[in-house]
Image: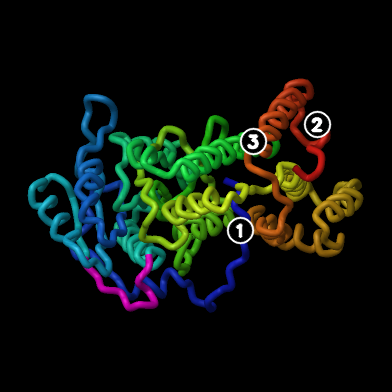
Amino acid sequence: MLHICRPLRPLGSASPLLARLSHLPLVDAPLLPQCRSCVIVPVRDEAERIESTLAALAYQIERPGLPLDPRSYEVIVLANNCRDQTADIARRFADDRPQLRLHIVELTLPAAEAHVGRARQLLMDEAYRRFAGAGKARGIIASTDGDTRVALDWLAATAFEIDRGADAVGGRILTDDNERQALEAQARRCFLYDVGYQYLTAQLEACIDPDPLDAWPRHYQHFGASLALSAEAYARAGGLPAVRSPEDVALYCALRRIDAGIRHSPLVKVITSARRYGRAGMGLAAQLADWSTVGAGRKPYLVEAVGRTEERLVNRIRLRQLWRQPRSLASTDAEVAALATRLRVPSERLAEELSACQAFGLLWERLNPEDPANAPKSEVEEAIRQLRRRIVLWKQALKSARTGPVGIAPRAARGGG
């Protein structure tokens, strides 16, 4: 998913992460020496689902027929502001499965902090604190949700991607079949269109601006139901930003700012709820509810026009190549001027930013200010048709040239769409 990241204002000269750690720990029990992954699960009023969530975590495998060493991971559940029996059910589950390293924390957060962003932040900070105290820079902080069932090899597949060099791993988030089928026809239709649109957009991105660490096949999701990262990457990014929601997207943007290697792995899978009434204000449930109203009001489902998406991706790869160039090249001034025109910024500013920014992700964020909400729009069905055509053309151009996408771009999509 092509999220447009916005600059975060610094909270002060001190590290926000270090300042927050003074309020911990949440868990007194020591980290086992064998522990490599700390799974964090923020929950509120999930009495109906928490047991299936924990059961999926309790029986992880390394590969078929070989259980994952239960000492290699732990699970921290934060039951925040619950009005049901979520915590009691989790405690009984832990008592019945002593082999599972399961820590249950109950908190009543003040009204201003009683949201999933703060709950996930507390948990990820705690996981980082535990790994940092043990000197485990590559310890894996793995996030999921209380309405989600991870695959049996979820932890093993995540560790596989981290071992291959990823700093963070977004898992493929599927929806529960029965709950998806129970959705209103229009919500289900919009959901399926959205999956196709996002998937094709990710494929176009892989054609135009490929990332060797996130090579195709890949997907487009980096959300809290399946999002993992190393402890050192969490620290370099400054921790989970203090936002209500979508806190997972804010963390993704923070990782992009430091050029962290992010893998959207098709090997890592979870199944999450397709309910319309969720716990987060901007989560999947809210989106499904919005899609239901699209049908009721006979409004079209609009997405960013493909022409604008393609333009942004081409600008990004050109900026990346210019950023990597030695500043002494004779062609640089002309290239800066040409790209500045495409980016709609003064040449002087582009030159200054190229010299100042050590991380490409931060550079791109600073020079890509357009809000997607203000970008040209297209109906999703038409966008999908155009994406399929553009992907075919890009693949043909790349196959013919074999010299990289810039300079061989196929004729742009017409009409901004």
Mark 2 or 3: in front is 3
Give the residue number, with chain letter if any, for mark 1: 5
Cα–Cα span, label 1 and label 3: 24 Å
Q: Is residue 46 above or below residue 156?
A: below
Q: Which mark is residue 410?
A: 2
Task: State if disc 3 and disc 2 touch (CB < 8 Å).
Answer: no
The first of marks 1 and 3 along the sequence is 1
**In which quadrant of the rendered view does residue 197 lie?**
top right
The first of marks 2 and 3 along the sequence is 3
With 49 as the anchor, is 6 left or right in this view? right
The boundaries of the magenta stretch are 106-115
From the top left corner, tell me how far across and down residue 367 is, in percent.
73, 59
State the quadrant of the C terminus. Answer: top right
With 69 as the anchor, is 242 left or right in this view? right
Label 1 packing within 10 angstroms: few (<14), some (14-19), many (20+): many
Mark 1 or 3: in front is 3
Secondary structure found at label 2: loop
State the residue lying farthest toward the top. Answer: 400
Q: Nearer the viewer, residue 13 or 266?
A: 266
From the top left corner, tell me how far across and down residue 330 is, in percent.
91, 47
Q: Is residue 133 visible?
A: no
Q: Nearer the viewer, residue 335 or 86?
A: 86
Identified by mark 1, the residue type is Cys
Give the residue number, with chain letter if any, for mark 3: 384
Residue under the image location 83 percent in, 51 percent down: 342
Would you say residue 109 sits in the magenta stretch?
Answer: yes
Secondary structure found at label 3: helix
Q: Is residue 60 above or below residue 291?
A: above
Cα–Cα span, label 2 and label 1: 27 Å
Q: Is residue 162 above or below residue 287?
A: above
Identified by mark 2, the residue type is Pro
Task: State if disc 1 and disc 2 touch (CB < 8 Å).
Answer: no
